[in-house]
Amino acid sequence: MTLEGIDVEDASGAFIPELVEVECAVCGSRDYRVLLPDTLGNRPPVFGYKWTPEIRLCYRVVRCAGCGHAYSSPRLKNMFEHYVDTYDAGYLDNAPLRVATAENVLEKIREFVPSGRLLDVGCASGDFLEVARAFYDVEGLELSTWAVDISREKGLTVDAKLLEEKAQEGEQYDVITMWGVIEHLEHPEVEMKYVNQLLKPGGIACFWTGDSDSLFFKILGARWWYVLGQHIQYFSRKSIQTLLEKAGFEKLHDGIYPYVISYKYLAISLSRYRGVGALFSAVVAVLGLEDKTFVLRKPDEIFAIYQKRPIQ
């Protein structure tokens, strides 16, 4: 349940976005302890993934006293509406890395469901779908108009719809994927029920997100790379399992996401840490490793596959 916020205006009459206090999406508790202070105030976060100091500003992050799930509260109401106008040209530069990652991920998915219909939720510019269509009949959901247009130019079927709207159409799929999506959802407890509804009996749902119980978060705190203003859910392996079990799923696979990355992109990611990025970039340049790629398996990244439970 959402505790309603209030729309206000500043001294100049300018509109200030409405923030809402929310309860835990996993267990419904309103008891929490503060993990990270608010650094955004009454402003929307940066949407997109260009690494600037502003992208790290976030709403207050709390940890539920009931189940341990971490989430942002208070936060901007109806954040999903802001994704419609999201434009991130720099995102396209790393398409080859996402394609290579998709090839690794699909090896694991096909161990459970080798063929059928696949729906990628939050498909962005369609890199994963491009690879997956060699094995599945693929479709995507995406809110960004810019990304939808790019996906459709690739010949992909992508709709600018919410999960709720898609579920109402009555179609079902063998595989639903959500790569870096669940941490953006305002009400994942509701959305996962739509995912269940969209799956055929025995169908699987696949997720990639950060692990807020990881040593990285405990050490880095607000400097952890998953702490971004647009991320409002910080799952752990325990909390995502609790959420999905409530939504009618059972776990098939609990691993680490096999992300393919280049030394150049890793240097860009490390640039948020003063001195570290510059030193790493210099070493990479001297050794001529900028375009060399490798599989990065970080223990703070969850790669989970869940199966729709049969009706008892």
Image: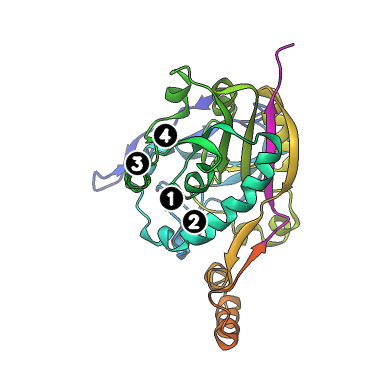
Looking at the rendered image, the disc whose residue lies closer to the viewer, 2 or 4, is 4
Residue at the spot of label 3? 84
Residue at the spot of label 4? 78
301 w.r.t. 233: above or below? below
- The answer to whether 257 appears left or right of 72 in the picture is right
Q: Which residues are magenta?
A: 296-312
Q: Secondary structure at mark 3?
A: helix
- The answer to whether 63 appears left or right of 138 in the picture is right
Q: Please name whichever residue, 183 or 31, is drawn nearer the observer in this view of the structure.
A: 183
Q: Amino acid at mark 1?
A: Pro
Q: For label 2, count other residues whose C-alpha is less than 10 Å away and answer few (under 14), some (14-19) or many (20+).
A: many
Q: For label 3, count other residues whose C-alpha is less than 10 Å away and answer few (under 14), some (14-19) or many (20+).
A: some
Q: Earlier in the sequence, mark 2 or mark 1?
A: 1
Looking at the rendered image, the disc whose residue lies closer to the viewer, 4 or 3, is 3
Q: Residue at x 47, y 28 (%)?
A: 163
Q: Earlier in the sequence, mark 2 or mark 3?
A: 2
Q: Quadrant of the N terminus?
A: top right
Q: Residue at x 55, y 67 (%)?
A: 269
Whether residue 133 is in magenta: the answer is: no
- Display coloring: rainbow
Q: Earlier in the sequence, mark 2 or mark 4?
A: 2
Residue at the spot of label 1? 45
The residues tagged by marks 2 and 4 sit, at their Cα atoms, a distance apart of 18 Å
The residues tagged by marks 2 and 3 sit, at their Cα atoms, a distance apart of 21 Å
Residue at the spot of label 2? 57
